Amino acid sequence: MSLYENTQKLIVRAADTMDLMPEVRVVMNEPERILTVDFHIHRDNGKIEMFRGFRVQHNTLRGPAKGGIRFHPQVDMGEVKALAGWMSIKCAVADIPYGGGKGGIEVDSAKLSGCELEQLTREFTRAIAPIIGPRRDVPAPDVRTNGQIMDWIADEYHKIHPKEDDYLAVVTGKTLENGGSLGRDSATAAGGVHVLEAFLETKKEQLKGMRVAIQGFGNAGHHAARILQEKGAKIIAVTDSKGGIFAEDGFDPIKAHNCKLKKGGVGECLLESEGSGKDQKEISNDDILALECDILVLAALENQVTIENAENIRAKIVVELANGPTTPEAHEILEKRMITVLPDVLANAGGVTVSYYEWEQNLRHEKWTEEQVAEKLEKSQKKAFEDVAKIAEEFKTDFRNASYVLALRRIEHAFLEKHSAAAHGFSCSNPI
């Protein structure tokens, strides 16, 4: 089943749970707008090469579209539509005034020179410029894009709209010197930990002493490991696409991350950090899923826990920092096995929440401290969990379905407000 089909299945399940209005079901079924663009750049060797890109705006009832831009050879419309739908749900769960969007370019950006990458970014920005803007659609970094690329987008947008005072707010995830927000790099991980802590509070439990395995030792994964260790948890395993390490007694994830930066993969870091973990062993990206632990953090890719391996999961709690790491069928198996899943649209909403803070700072021409951002994020994520928990109790359902129900309720409310106002304010200019 495709990512788009998985997303639609989750939306339908929640819609049936809450008896969502038929009109809103139709609205949520397809994106509001899909833009496909073809453009060219001049390669360093003098040749002209064409590229195809997309921008999808799934739903803007609650505010401007919001979502990342990825540069990847496998970018396709189905994937982009699915991720845009996720963003509609995620922003509504976090109760920030955005809708869902997503975009990308079919390109192996690793094969481009720095000059070619900048040219690609600027030409793509010009191609999608008619539908983006600080109050229309606000892109962000995603797979193989970063702060520098967001800076180029903001700069190119400013060239197209030189009188726009708030042009920096056209994208988030920019570098700090160009309007980015403090705290953004660790926001996804920090937000997930806040949700985890809020859940543990309901069980009168603490992180201290809990054994944690983390699949996906990239940006979100390594920050999650650091934060969890600082709060007293024991990191017993981490993996990335090239392998990983496991130590029954735990190890120092900071030293493991530093080693990964040097060697290119955490699987190459066995015994690199003396005293940080005894009897370290190699572990694969698949085997880490079956480790006996208290908390399994999924911070890698989509569709990692499937109907084929869900019975092997031995964690008590699964925290989804990646988008769609668990298929709907696998989720049902985990729920039947009484494994708590803190779902992606709730657990990883810290990233888009701090993106929203960056947007606010840009519009207000302010700069918040890291402490201000961290305080706001903790309050927001814990409130989101409380809201989801109330829905879960109301409908006697799991946290994933409750998250979608909560989001659809808020989108339905926005739909009713919009069409109530339109009904009172519209009159036919030339009635038949």
Image: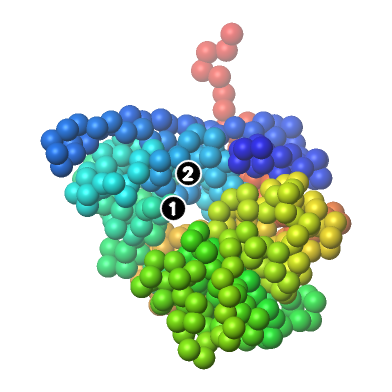
Mark 1 falls on what kind of element?
Answer: loop
- Residue with the mark numbered 1: 142
Three-letter amino acid code at the position of disc 1: Asp
Report x, y in % for residue 128. 35, 37
- Residue extending furthest top? 432
- Residue with the mark numbered 2: 102
151 versus 20 height, above or below: below
Quadrant housing the C terminus: top right
100 versus 39 height, above or below: below
Q: State how far apart marks 1 and 2 are (Cα).
A: 9 Å
Quadrant housing the N terminus: top right
Horizontal side, residue 194 vs residue 107: left or right: right
Report x, y in % for residue 32. 53, 33
Report x, y in % for residue 161. 25, 43
Q: Residue at x 32, y 68 (%)?
A: 176
Report x, y in % for residue 61. 57, 42
Horizontal side, residue 282 vs residue 306: left or right: left
Marks 1,2: beta carbons within 8 A? yes
